[in-house]
Image (cartoon, rainbow, N blue to C red):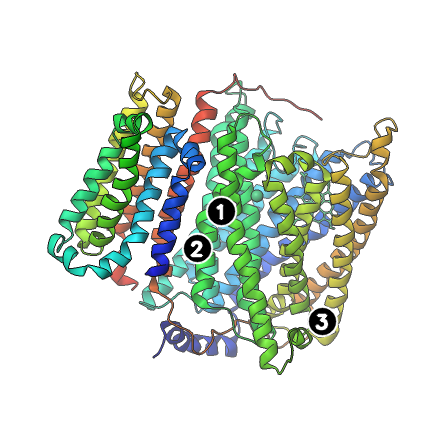
Amino acid sequence: MMTQFIYGLLFYIFLMLPPVANLVESIMITHMHMQMPMLVVSGFLMAGIFLKRFPRFFEKWNSNGIPGITLFMIVIIYWTIPRTMDEALTYQAIEAWKFISLPFLAGFPLRDSWKKLTKAGKNLIIIIFTVKYFGMGALYIWSEDQLCNNYLVIDQLTLGWGFITTAICLVIYLVYAFTVDPTKYE
Amino acid sequence: MQTSVSQNKLVSGFTDKANKALGISKQDALISKSYLAVAFIALLLGGLLGLLQGLNRAGLLELPAWLNYYQVLTAHGILLVVVLSAFFTIGYFYAGLSHTLGGLLPKVRKIAWIGFWTKIVGFVLVVIPILMNEASVMYTFYPPMKAHPMFYFGLALIVVGVWFLAAGAFINVANWRKNHKGEHLPILAFFATGVFVLLVGATAFVAVEVLFMIIPWSLGWVDTINVMVARTLFWAFGHTAVNIWYLTAVSAWYVVIPKVIGGTRFNDYLTRVVVIALVIMNITGGFHHQIIDPGISLPIKFMHVFMSLAIGFPSLMTAYAMFRVFERTGRRKGAKGALGWIKKLPWGDVRFLSPFIAMAAFAPAGAGGIVQSTNQLDQVVHNTMWIVGHFHLTLGMSVVMTFFGVSYWLVPYISNRVLTPKMNKLGVIQTIIWTIGMVIMAFSMHTAGLFGAPRRTSYTTYGDFSASLGWDPYMAAVGVGATLLLVAVIIQVYAVFNMMFFAPKGTTEFPIAEVEADEAKTPYMTERWGVWVVVMLIVIAMAYVLPLTDMIVNAPPGSPPFKTW
Ligand code: HEM
Ligand SMILES: [Cu+2]
């Protein structure tokens, strides 16, 4: 747990380094599909030790995982809105909010909630993401206008295809989850 | 506490005994034999062409007017990097699946044969236009160079053949898992699963390139082709293919070599993690072949440096694992001091010697790979003989010498014959000649490349231009190396067919090392291939969406076909 925390923290610091942050934020798709998930991962890694230290807190607020995963979804969905990305690049405060909310309000609750969810609950979350990703993909691909002041239309189009391909991967996972019966193998 | 791996051993202990008593079933053996026979015939032909190239580049041999240098080079590349490697990999893993999973299913055998003949027909379709000098486009077949359409139809059939083989392997693995609930897949079958997953992933890219871009263009249905997209799809395949051959060799390093030297294998969990890591991160490495390509922005190239170097990590783990196993085994045999274990290794056993040299070659080969992944350094060596030197180290030594080492027990095993001491000695001689030849050839290729000698160019002095005359001594050494190599090829091919049809009858063991007795249980997570495949797909999507969208949306007008030869 401790080593995981240290790796998570180092990863978090690495992502904060100005050259790293500048590079990934200079491209729309790496901003949303690389930096943001990696921030969540860094929080996920750091969370373990806190879950162990403060089990009662998490038990009290997140006994069945649903509050936690709801918080996770809200934070993630918030950050896929074009405007939020723009603001993160424009206002220091929003940029700081990104670096706080994704690891600590998405990564932490994800770590605590995922294992508490039932299988159906997990699949439901993935289904929601799949639908949303197809929707966001369509939005970014077919919108005629530039959605972000900071990114070009081509960036937007690329991000749209990133959403679509990720959604396709999720569909493949869901097909696998619903057609392959693990009890036959495990 | 009993670990599930060792439980697994108990169950497979039974099939092991059955297999030991009966050997491999005749039908399963025939499949592997056919694949290996094709592989080594390809080695003979490819080696012969390699000698022609080597002698030509040395300035010793002018090819006759009816034989074009690029025609030879195309055939050499395809025979060795596609046919030899793919057929060996399939023959070896199908024998491994048969051995560790208690025989192939009748259905799977049928699929394996369909795949075999699909590949052979595809291969014939590829060879005909090459022989007619209608497809001298080299094994990379980069547009806008255009070959005869038959060439591309042949490639497509080869890919379909690979898919049959992969499907067969998956069916057999799934069936085994149904009958062995909760157990870990035997380690060699685990490697096979990873290899076939990667084969499907890699060939999907080239299938898109060939079916949807090149074939319509080569038939004249469309006028132009997007060259950058085609190259990108090709390298997603080409890079991965080469890494698959490497992963095949690595499987023998982890699983077989420890047994050959009388030891146990490296930690089961870490071994499986290495396989999974290589599968997930491999395909995206293809971009390092395009470091010098225009039309890919610098930040993308920069990020892909990490993707490429990431693959180096499991390779370094492998290097560590191998030396750990060697040392542990040597010490158990009573070795003293820091390096005493080296003396305890069976140097006179070709089944060890050849793969050992293969592993050693990976050190300079890997270092060269890191050089080439670095943009500034690659500017110097890109498209020079350096690159040719590099992949003769990686493929011509690390991969192929492991395959040779494997052939000295695999061929007798599937043929119900034995490796005689005499044949072993011949194998050792073969190994030494090949090593000397390849070291001379690869070293001179690297050096000539550093001085600027281009690859894929038949002999020329550029009008006796002084700088290019400086390459000549090194290119002459390439000719010397090539000659030694052909001698080694002939011995190796002789050995394979002798062991297949003429060696004394008897039973040969399929060497699979056991895990350490006190090893902790491997988490079941490693067996969730469905999840790993999805992770792999997401990584691929992330890596390719950005450059491909850019190449398609901001595409130049596209290129009509050219016949440059
Ligand atoms: C008898 C042993 C071998 C000899 C003498 C030999 C020699 C050569 C030479 C001289 C070249 C041409 C360089 C150029 O003009 O660019 C070449 C290219 C090549 N060789 Fe080999 N080689 C041998 C074995 C192998 C093996 C075992 C492999 C792979 C498994 C291999 C794979 C290749 C490939 C992929 C190319 C590049 C073809 C191209 O540029 O399109 N070779 N080889
Ligand atoms: Cu590569």
Is residue B70 toward the left or the right of residue B280 in the image? Answer: right
Amino acid bearing label 1: Asn
Image coordinates of residue B491 in percent, x first then y, are: 76, 61
Q: CA distance from mark 2 to mark 1?
A: 10 Å
Crowding at mark 1 (Cα within 10 Å: few <14, some 14-19, many 20+): many
The residue sitting at 46% across, 65% down in the picture is B187
- Camera sees residue A173: yes
User: Which badge, 2 or 3, is on the more N-terminal residue?
Assistant: 2
Is residue B559 toward the left or the right of residue B273 in the image? Answer: right
Image coordinates of residue B185 in percent, x first then y, are: 40, 65
Q: Chain of mark 1?
A: B
Residue tagged 3: B424
Q: CA distance from mark 1 to mark 3?
A: 36 Å
User: Which badge, 2 or 1, is on the more N-terminal residue?
Assistant: 2
Q: Quadrant of the N terminus of chain A?
A: bottom left
Residue tagged 2: B276
Residue tagged 1: B282
B172 versus A14 height, above or below:
below
Amino acid bearing label 3: Asn
Q: Nearer the viewer, residue B62 or A69?
A: A69
Do discs 1 and 3 share a chain? Answer: yes
Residue at the far left in the pictured view: A60
Secondary element at image label 1: helix
B27 versus B332 height, above or below:
above
Where is ligand 1, by quadrant? Answer: top right
Image marks 2 and 1: residues in contact by CB distance under 8 Å: no
